[in-house]
Amino acid sequence: MKPHYIPTILIMKQIVYLLAAAMILASCGSAKLAVPEKFQAVSEKMPVKGVNAWIVNQKLSFGKYQTSKVKRGWVATTGEDYYTIEQRMLRMFSVNTFNSIKHEKNRYRYTISNGIDEAKIYCVEKMTREDLNIETNNRFLGDISRTNHWQYCFTAAILPMKDTTSAPWQLVMYNTYDRAKDTARKLFDLPYVEEEGYATNESEKIMIRPLRIKNLTTKNGKEAKYPVKILSGYELTIDDGVIAVIDKLGNNLWVYNE
């Protein structure tokens, strides 16, 4: 797990802290992620305080870092329904099926500081979802809806306020689901989702990989097992070397010492 040597390691560490603040905002932990003992031994653990499910006016703190109150804009939602030619013909036989598309956009911003350096972070979330809807006109069956496609994208711009010589960083995370490509067949199979995450300032690039687990330990020390793998955190790497682990379940940040 030891990463390659990075000459600008101090700058990279600060970027890791900024990324953690951007990615852990919407989490609400009830268990803890099993971080490998070898990584724990060479890393610093920083509990993240102030996390809540509402985000608005939320203030995070970990280690020497603290954010301002998170200012969140209004969630902009638009949508429309449409019919294909086949669906229009089925309506003649009292079979009502139609497609719906929903677009959702959200913005929020805050600053983060360690008492010396400070940066502004601007975040944007975008989601597009397309469903097939069937009105059965049967009180026992009700209406049926099936998701055919969705796309979610989270971006964050990280702008240094005091050190104007430092290049701004951009964080990008997205996932896409296409029912035509889905390989899930069994009851507890997870749908096939294409996803990628990274942060870059054009000269350096940090890859972000989601961590999913079935077995976990609750805060009471009890072992628990989910029928499917749940998102538990993120692993940040450079040249295949792990430099940080973000634990969303326990709200902790682990950063490689060297």
Image (tube, grey):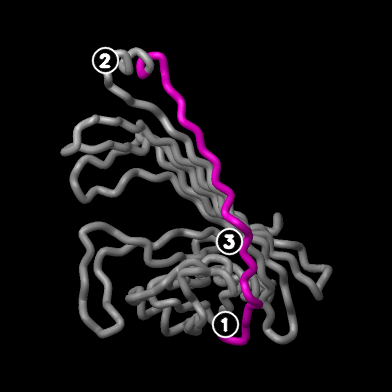
Tell whether position 69 is magenta: yes
Q: 12 or 249, which lies in front? A: 249
Left or right: 123 as drawn, with respect to 77: right
Side of 240 relative to 107 (left or right): left
Q: Residues within 10 Å of mark 2 (few under 14, many from 20)?
A: few
Q: Please check the rendered image and state whether residue 179 is part of the magenta-colored stretch, yes or no.
A: no
Q: Which mark is residue 61?
A: 1
Is residue 224 positioned above or below 105 on the image? below
Q: Which residue lies at the image location 21% right of the left edge and 67% below the top edge? A: 225
Label 2: which secondary element: loop
Callout 1 secondary element: strand
Residue 35, how many percent across, how many down? 37, 75
First along the sequence among labels 3 and 1: 1
The crowding category of the residue bearing disc 3, from other C-alpha atoms within 10 Å (few below 14, some 14 to 19, many at least 20), is many
Q: Quadrant of the C terminus?
A: bottom right
Mark 1: amino acid: Ser
- Residue range in magenta is 63-87
Task: Work out which residue is located at the far right of the displayed protein and give it.
Answer: 164
Regarding residue 92, the answer to whether it shows in the image is yes
Q: Nearer the viewer, mark 1 or mark 2?
A: 2
The residue beneath circle 2 is 93
Mark toward the viewer: 3 or 2: 2
Q: Which residue is mark 3?
A: 206
Identify residue type, mark 2: Phe
Q: Is label 3 in a helix, a strand or a loop?
A: strand
- Residue flagged by tag 3: what amino acid is it? Ile
Is 135 rendered above or below residue 108? above
